[in-house]
Amino acid sequence: MVRAAALPARSGIGLKLAHARELLASRPDLGFLEVHAENLMGAGGPPCAWAAALRREYPLALHGVALSLGADAPLDPAHLARLVALCRRYDPAAVSEHLAWSSHGPFYLNDLLPVAYDRPTLARVAAHIEQLQRALARPILLENPSTYLRFQSSCLDEVDFLAELSRTTGCGLLLDVNNVWVSAVNHGFDPFAYLERFPLERVEEIHLAGAAPDRDLDGAPLLIDAHDRPVADPVWALYAFVIARIGPCPTLIEWDNDVPPPARLVEEAARAEAVARDVLAPSIERAA
């Protein structure tokens, strides 16, 4: 496997094809663009043309949402072939997928559903990652999930599960800081303690997003990974905690619902870079 040229250690935004014309005209100061792979799996047309034009201006990351690495079934060969073709066409700087499943037999569920953290699931997901990496001839990045329930059969901690997958398959990790916060609120654990144990040395990209507050049937706080609003203050605090430990890292602003104009997304990306600068400024001054 050949590791592609890394994304720049700057901030980027998700590519919405409705924004493509404006992004090409204004060329905002961004480190990279990231697009859901499935949005480019057509045979051509405007989406592919816009993505190709923007690929000439910015590094591009492909973020898969439907390969279903966690499914208790083989990977869909047609979907895998389409993803391989996309990588050949766009030569992305990173390819990522989720620790989740979203299909059962011929049915696609349009959601990212959790997996049990046990040894059989670990072996199955590892085999799927290895199959994907062989097909792409490159390592992928695996994203930690946001979850709303836990399986009684789970016998491994989520951090240990991700660390073992990365160690055995050679994949990198995409640390979604918002997902950590969402899961911490929903399950009642300390997100900072989670990140203290996370294999940060394997992290090659970070995601930041907004979550929607709600209540469960018992009235307890519940967060929905909605990607429909600005990054929340607790997520910025967790992001600063991570950056202080690993230094600059490619960071994506995810905003997929109720999407504002591109300028607002660029503002969020600029804030991420400002947070990183503020966190790292004392160490830079000491080095000078």
Image (spheres, rainbow, N blue to C red):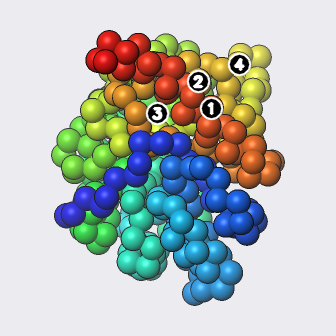
| Cβ atoms under marks 4 and 3 closer than 8 Å | no
Going by the numbered disc 1, the residue's amino acid type is: Arg
Q: Residue furthest front?
A: 288
Secondary structure at badge 3 equals loop
Dot 4 surroundings within 10 Å: few (below 14), some, or many (20 or more)? Answer: some
Q: Identify the residue under disc 3.
A: 151
Looking at the image, do the residues carrying marks 2 and 1 touch, with CB atoms under 8 Å apart? yes
Q: Calculate the distance from the C-alpha at mark 3 to the C-alpha at mark 1.
A: 37 Å
Kind of residue indicated by mark 3? Phe
Disc nearer the start of the sequence (1/4): 4
Q: Are marks 3 and 1 in contact (CB under 8 Å)?
A: no
Residue 233's spot in the image, x, y percent?
A: 66, 20
- Which residue lies under the disc numbered 2? 236
- Distance between mark 4 and mark 3 Cα atoms: 20 Å
Look at the picture and state if 204 lies above or below 84: above
* 19 displayed left or right of 187: right
Of mark 3 and mark 1, the one earlier in the sequence is: 3
Reading the image, the residue beneath label 1 is: 271
Percent of width and height locating residue 189: 50, 15
Classify mark 2: residues with Cα within 10 Å, few (<14), some (14-19) or many (20+): some
Residue that mark 4 sits on: 221
Could you tell whether 176 is left or right of 232 in the image? left
How far is disc 1 from disc 4 in space, using C-alphas?
27 Å
The residue sitting at 46% across, 33% down in the picture is: 151
Estimate the x, y position of residue 134 in percent, counting from the top left.
Answer: 24, 68
